[in-house]
Image: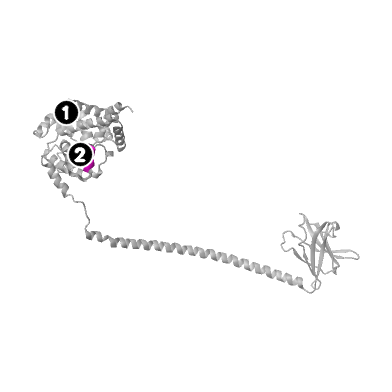
Amino acid sequence: MDVEKYIASGILELYVAGALSPEENLEVQHYAIQYPEVKKEIEAIEAAMLELTRTTSPKMPADAFSKIRAELDEVIPFMPTASEKKTPWSNYLGWAASILFAVGMLWMYMQNSDLKSEIEVTHQEKESLEEIISTTREEVADKESLLQELRDRNVTVVALGGQTVSPNSYAKAYWNKEEQKVIIDAQGLPDPPPGFTYQVWSLKLDPLTPTSLGLLDDLASDDTKLFTLENPNASEAFGITLEPEGGSETPTLEQLYTLGAVGA
Amino acid sequence: MDLDNLIQQFQKKDKVAFETLYDMYAENICGVINVILKDPERSQELCQDVFVKIWNKSDQYDTSKGRFFTWILNIARNTAIDELRSKSHKNQKKNLAVDSLVGIYENSEDLNGKIDTIGLQSLLKGLKDKCIILIDMLYFKGFTQKEAAKELKTPIGTIKTRIRSCISEIRKKMA
């Protein structure tokens, strides 16, 4: 910094007058510490003002300070009296109690609403569990009635074995001659390719006479893979072939998947 | 004891230190008040009040506010200006717009030798009116540099260089 230029700027005269902003004051103080010339100049300016103001004084009486001193002694620091000190406690206690109460109430309210929402959630869980139970019960009932049907004394079980096209395939036919119904368990058949479906045939062997019992539509999406078909025929064997969607008039023997003879 | 130590002791409510400060600055403070009031007796009374205020406000001073003299100068001129305002309510003849330093300089003989007329005249002799007006504003009326610039319709830069040259002239006369 150019100290001479700084001094010549007039900022120090304003500093002594108290005409600067607090920031400028700090700046001047900073330079006064850093540069002794600045400090010396400030003192010289102050000395000029002291000289000027001394000339305009009507001269203080010699005993003036003793009067001031007397006033200094009069200024007794404020001391709260004992009674004033005691009273606030009950006030504070009252305030403290009411604040505590308010906080407590708020806490209780929050606890209460928490519990309410927990109950709501539990209620919903209970409803969905009940739904699952009732669905499961229905499924169990269905399975039991199916089991009953399969266990019926009039049912003949026919195992259908895999043929040349698909040696690993298998199926079972539960034939109730009394009720003229056959239940096909198609669990052992592969999902048919798109545009095809399985067709179940009742066969008479001599001469070979196939009669269509029906189609195993939507095999892929059926979980149980059980199909109940009408069978009023005196069947000697059952066969399952792969046919174009909608079925065929006569079985496509090249696509015979499973075959089994009654009583074999 | 140097000034800094003296001020520290004063801030610890040391009355001896305070009396030393009083001895150093009482006439200056009284002089400032008298420039503003132009009433020697009232100025003496107010000067005592100002020192009681200084004592009571001792903890408010710190070096970031500037020089100690600047701080007590500010208390003195505020007290005197308040006095002038309250008086001017009662006595409309008093006019706040009167230039205090110009007034006391021009009418210094009227003060019946109560002030150092010779000393004052020797310090201000030959100073231009605009110097005296500017010293009055900045030192005796407590204008900030911005307020002075606005009042005189003069840029702050000019205010600074002018006050520099005005105070320099007074300093030359002291030497």
Q: Position of residue A209 (x, y in %)?
A: 88, 64
Residue B36 seen anywhere in this rendered image of the structure: no
Q: What residue range appears in magenta?
A: B1-10
The local secondary structure at tag 1 comes to helix
Residue wearing tag 1: B123
Residue type indicated by callout 2: Arg
- Which mark, by number, is residue A125? none
Q: Position of residue B86 (x, y in %)?
A: 17, 43
The local secondary structure at tag 2 comes to helix
* Nearer-the-camera pick, B20 or A182: B20
| Vertical side of A154 occupied by A171: above or below | above
Q: Chain of mark 2?
A: B
Q: Quadrant of residue A54?
A: top left
Q: Main secondary structure of the magenta part?
A: helix
Residue at position x 72%, y 71% in the image: A145
Tag in front: 1 or 2 = 1
* Nearer-the-camera pick, B16 or B43: B16
Task: For the N terminus of chain A, give its image quadrant.
Answer: top left
Is A34 in the magenta?
no
Q: Position of residue A137 (x, y in %)?
A: 65, 69
Q: Quadrant of residue B157?
A: top left
Residue A101 seen anywhere in this rendered image of the structure: yes
Neighbour class for label 1 at 10 Å: few (<14), some, many (≥20)? Answer: many
Neighbour class for label 2 at 10 Å: few (<14), some, many (≥20)? Answer: many
Residue wearing tag 2: B77
Closer to the chain start, of discs 1 and 2, is 2
Q: Quadrant of residue A165?
A: bottom right
Q: Position of residue A23 (x, y in %)?
A: 31, 37
Q: Chain of mark 1?
A: B
